[in-house]
Image (cartoon, grey):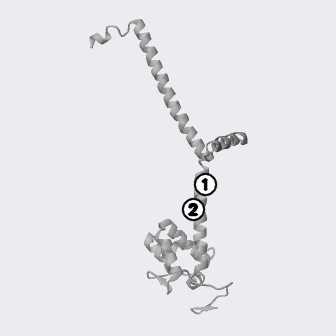
Amino acid sequence: MSWHGSTFSGMGEASSADPVKVSQWVESADEFQCKWAVKYLWNQAVPGGSLDLYLGELSRGQLAGLVEWMLCADGDSYGGSTFPMPINGVRLHGEEYFAKARNAWNQRVNRQKKASQSKNTIVVDPETKSKIRKLASEHNLKDGEFLSILIDLMSERRGAVEGIIRQRKEAKRAAIASDLGIFSGFGDSL
């Protein structure tokens, strides 16, 4: 298969990326995501190649434009710069590369989300987990919902109990002070 004088042999039918889908994807992408996409596409065309030298201090908008240019545009230069890569190969396999990039980005996001969630994980022994599951099902709740409600109730109870204990201590203090006559005449001097 020939494309702009370069010869490519590929598996299956190659096609360029859908400009609308690419535009929608980069529109919602931040600077980090756009830079990641440029590097990902670059590595599809030039495995192990370094792109940092060519990116310099590009803005989010420039990086987003670069992603669109790499996948959908014509020409060998972007913003007056020529990138030393087989850009036609990226464009020829644009649909495949873009699909891979989106999947890889989604996996990255999911891994980060799972890592963040695992930091909030509490490990309990199987017997306790079974008890939680049984109690939760009795109330038609998921395990996490049940535990959340239970903790809220315990926290509220603790606050109430602490309030009662504080009141009792204050009452005992007042009774002892009264018995010792500490407060007698004290109110009169105010």
In the image, residue 82 sits, relative to residue 52, either above or below, namely below
Q: Amino acid at mark 2?
A: Val
Label 1 neighbourhood size at 10 Å, few (<14), some (14-19), many (20+)? Answer: few
User: Residue drawn at (50%, 27%), measured in percent from left and top?
Assistant: 162
Does label 1 or label 2 sit earlier along the sequence? 2
The residue sitting at the right extreme is 127
Percent from the top left, x then y, of residue 9? 67, 87
Quarter where residue 84 is shown:
bottom right
Q: Is residue 57 left or right of residue 108?
A: left
| Quadrant in which the C terminus is drawn | top left
Q: Is residue 172 left or right of residue 93?
A: left
Circle on res. 183: none
Q: Amino acid at mark 1?
A: Ala
Percent from the top left, x then y, of residue 176? 44, 10
Percent from the top left, x then y, of residue 149? 56, 41
Q: CA distance from mark 1 to mark 2?
A: 10 Å
In the image, residue 1 sits, relative to residue 52, either above or below, namely below
Q: Is residue 116 visible?
A: yes
Which residue corresponds to mark 2?
Answer: 109
The residue sitting at the top extreme is 180
User: Residue drawn at (66%, 41%), measured in percent from left and top?
Assistant: 132
Q: Is residue 56 visible?
A: no
Quarter where residue 108 is shown:
bottom right
Which residue corresponds to mark 1?
Answer: 115
Percent from the top left, x then y, of residue 46? 61, 78
Q: Secondary structure at mark 1?
A: helix
| Quadrant in which the N terminus is drawn | bottom right
User: Residue drawn at (63%, 43%), measured in percent from left and top?
Assistant: 136
Q: Secondary structure at mark 2?
A: helix
| Count of marks placed on residues | 2
Label 2 neighbourhood size at 10 Å, few (<14), some (14-19), many (20+)? Answer: few
